[in-house]
Image (cartoon, rainbow, N blue to C red):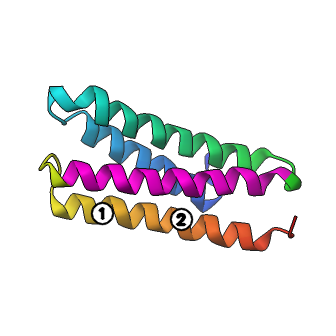
């Protein structure tokens, strides 16, 4: 599957990962291991779940997408904490939350398109 064959949710998640890696690299050294590493890993996990959902047989897609929804909520909470500590700006929080919401809407739409289990 070529990059341009990937679904929009994959592209949005890859872009969110790039943005996340750029932001977490700039966190204070004292927060890079806890918050930075956790944000990086959760965002990487989100990309892996999207990839699994893309390539999984139809009956297994929903489980990956439900797990992705939980990861997105965890990312929202962590980014809120990072902003509250002044490590990113309010505008950066609004941007990342917008991206996470977009990925969440795509996830929800994909879930609704799948047959009920």
Q: Identify the residue at image location x=49%, y=47%.
A: 14
Give the magenta part as a residue range.
60-83
Residue 71 colored magenta? Answer: yes
What is the quadrant of residue 114 in the picture? bottom right
Residue 18, given in percent of the width and then of the height, sits at 39, 43
Specify the principal SS of the magenta part. helix
Residue 66 colored magenta? Answer: yes
Dot 1 lies on which element? Answer: helix
Q: Identify the residue at image location x=71%, y=43%.
A: 52
Q: Which residue is nearer to you in this view: 88 or 74?
A: 74
Q: Which mark is residue 27?
A: none
Q: Nearer the viewer, mark 1 or mark 2?
A: 2
Answer whether residue 1 is visible to the viewer in this image: no
Q: Identify the residue at image location x=34%, y=38%.
A: 21
Dot 2 lies on which element? Answer: helix
Q: What residue did someone put label 2 on?
A: 104
Of the 4 image quadrants, the one containing the N terminus is: top right
Q: Which mark is residue 95?
A: 1
Residue 72, given in percent of the width and then of the height, sits at 49, 55
Q: Earlier in the sequence, mark 1 or mark 2?
A: 1
């Amino acid at each position: 599957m070529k990059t341009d064959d990937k679904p929009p949710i994959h592209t949005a998640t890859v872009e969110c990962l790039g943005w996340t890696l750029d932001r977490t690299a700039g966190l204070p050294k004292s927060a890079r291991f806890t918050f930075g590493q956790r944000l990086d890993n959760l965002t990487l996990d989100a990309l892996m779940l999207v990839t699994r959902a893309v390539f999984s047989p139809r009956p297994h897609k929903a489980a990956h997408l439900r797990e992705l929804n939980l990861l997105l909520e965890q990312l929202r909470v962590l980014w809120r904490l990072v902003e509250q500590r002044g490590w990113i700006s309010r505008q950066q929080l609004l941007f990342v939350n917008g991206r996470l919401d977009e990925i969440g809407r795509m996830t929800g739409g994909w879930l609704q398109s799948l047959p009920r289990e």
